[in-house]
Amino acid sequence: MLFRKARLTVPAILFLVLLRVAIGWHFFQEGVTKVRDGGFSSTPFLAAAKGPFADRFHAMIPDYDGSIRMDAKRMSEVCQAFAKKASEDFGFDEAQQTAVEDILKEFAAKRKETYDQWKPEIEQYTQGIERMNALKEDSSRANVESLRQQRDKIEAEWRTLGRPILAEIDQNVRELEDRINAVATDEQAAPDPAKPAKGADGKPIRKRIEFKFPGEPEITVRQVDRIIPIFDMVVGILLLLGLLTPLAGIAAGLFLVSVVMSQFPGYPGTQPTYYQAIEMLACFLVAFADAGRYAGLDFIPWSFWNRNAKVPANV
């Protein structure tokens, strides 16, 4: 035969198993920590992205530059659109629609207090949006280190200015979303009105209408924040057990590819991602070496397959 199946030595198998377990434990602990501590957000990670794919990462953050939230008129329109969608999806009656209108007025008044309190800062921040767009379009600032540092400093000051204002508006939006969703009865909010269901806590399972900004993509930071903790734990458990190892290893490797691409190697101003790149390569190694066959549950289907495979007759 021209090609023979590679054979691993005992020490190689031992360290391959240890590598699989170490990666699995890392992913599992990352997921558990996110769930236990709560409040996990991938927004800082996405916002810090640099390189040719930065805009794609930034687009996952709703209203990334804050231009909508800083505009009182546009925010009012977005809030009205959200309330209309909630009313239609839940099927609110006249009394409920009146309650929604009262909620909209209440939170519009709260936002007005924010806009009045921060009026000079909002005007300065809004002017800074155009300036930041102009700086990003200037390619020379990305290639010349001194100019890049100057741009990064200007952007940091601009974001620091807007951070407390946007935080107040975001809090307003979260409370508005909660209040309007709470108007719906359990029957109206049931995912399937024909089959109402209850959760483990005995409370009815309710669907939720999410507040969205215009132009949001299908996958935003909200979906990412819900998926990542579960993804980490599932991948970790599979690698620890050596179950579906190729699938788990490839999934983990691709996830780490996205982390590395967020700080594109060699792109001016990016942060080093050596550790993530090394673990990414290790994940692919574990996947393609089918490491779950060694001290893992993948050994069971592998041995069954080989036992039942046809052995070619000697010629």
Image (cartoon, rainbow, N blue to C red):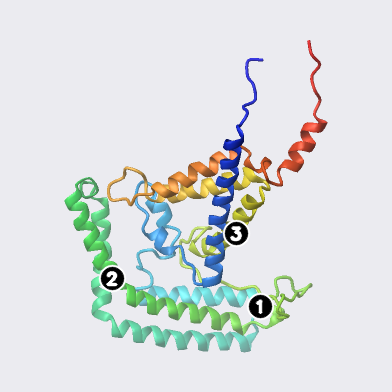
The numbered disc on residue 233 is 3
Mark 3 vs mark 2: in front: 3
The numbered disc on residue 219 is none
Q: Give, as a three-letter code, the residue at label 2.
A: Thr
Mark 3 residue element: helix
Q: Give, as a three-letter code, the residue at label 3.
A: Met
Residue toward you, 10 or 247: 10
Mark 1 residue element: loop
Q: Is residue 173 left or right of residue 11?
A: left
**Quarter in which the N terminus is drawn:** top right
What is the CA distance from the residue labelled 1 to the residue labelled 2? Answer: 41 Å
Outermost residue on the top side: it is 315
Residue toward you, 132 or 104: 132
Residue at image position (49%, 72%) is: 39
Picture layout, residue 33 above or below residue 7: below
The residue that mark 2 highlights is: 160
The numbered disc on residue 91 is 1
Residue at image position (56%, 68%) is: 35
Give the mark nearer the N terminus: 3 vs 1: 1
Q: Say few, some or many: other residues with alpha carbon within 10 Å of mark 1 (under 14 / 14 to 19 / 20 or more).
A: some
Give the mark nearer the N terminus: 3 vs 2: 2
Q: Position of residue 263 (x, y in %)?
A: 37, 50
Residue at image position (67%, 83%) is: 185
Picture layout, residue 159 above or below residue 167: above
**Quarter in which the C terminus is drawn:** top right
What is the CA distance from the residue labelled 3 to the residue labelled 2? Answer: 34 Å
Q: Are marks 3 and 1 in contact (CB under 8 Å)?
A: no
Outermost residue on the left side: it is 146
